[in-house]
């Protein structure tokens, strides 16, 4: 199974989660300036900024075709722990791309909120989530 991990992260929180997932799955976590080709599963990380996701993530997802990635597994960090799942799913244009049903979201440090998050426990949970997804597919 060809697994890829990509992320968009302004401040590094989502990058940390992406790196934990990638480590668990034995692949490299790269940002979305790195294209994806022939992935069976694409773990894709994003964050909430001003109640939405960054325009670069929207563009990246809307341009994906099923030959780039057959399935997207979304994960996210945000101050309010609200998932980007729905917003990212809405950007998928190719009907042949599957969007993994479950969302995985972790609180991310922002101003005085969620100090130190994602922390070790969060990263452990991210790894467990990734392992569970792969075992299930
Ligand atoms: C400019 C800006 C706007 C944000 N807006 C929101 C928001 O609307 N809702 C929310 O839950 N978190 C918001 N946050 C918090 C981020 O989602 C959170 O810190 C996240 O972990 C950042 O991920 P990153 O470090 O990978 O960029 C915002 C952060 C920034 C910097």
Image (cartoon, rainbow, N blue to C red):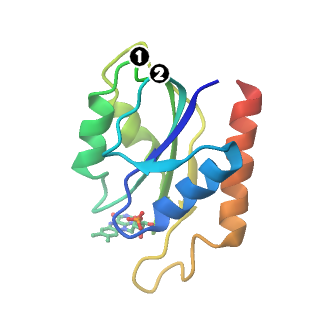
Mark 1–mark 2 Cα distance, whole angstroms, equals 5 Å
Residue placed at 39% from the left, 83% from the top? 111
Name the element at disc 1: loop
**Up/down of 25 relative to 83, above or below:** above
Q: Residues within 10 Å of mark 1 (few under 14, many from 20)?
A: some
- Which quadrant of the structure image shows residue 37? top left
Q: Residue furthest bottom?
A: 112
Of 87 and 13, the residue lying toward us: 13
The extreme top residue here reads 96
Q: Secondary structure at mark 2?
A: loop
Of the two numbered discs 1 and 2 on the same chain, state the one appearing first in sequence.
2
Q: Position of residue 89 (x, y in %)?
A: 40, 33
State which quarter of the image contains the N terminus. top right
* Residue that badge 1 annotates: 67
Residue beneath label 2, please?
A: 38
Residue at point 27% right, 40% down? Answer: 58
Depicted 78 relative to depicted 137: above or below: below
Q: For residue 80, say whether it is visible.
A: no
């Amino acid at each position: 199974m060809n697994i890829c991990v990509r992320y968009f992260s302004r401040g590094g929180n989502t990058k940390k989660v992406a790196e934990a997932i990638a480590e668990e799955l034995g692949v490299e976590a790269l940002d979305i300036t790195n294209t994806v080709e022939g992935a069976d599963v694409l773990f894709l990380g994003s964050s909430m900024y001003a109640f939405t996701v960054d325009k670069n993530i929207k563009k990246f997802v809307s341009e994906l075709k099923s030959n780039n990635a057959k399935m997207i597994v979304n994960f996210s960090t945000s101050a309010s722990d609200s998932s980007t799942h729905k917003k990212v799913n809405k950007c998928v244009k190719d009907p042949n791309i599957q969007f993994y049903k479950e969302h995985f979201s972790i609180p991310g440090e922002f101003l005085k909120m969620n100090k130190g998050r994602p922390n070790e426990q969060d990263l452990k949970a991210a790894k467990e989530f990734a392992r569970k997804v792969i075992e299930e597919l």
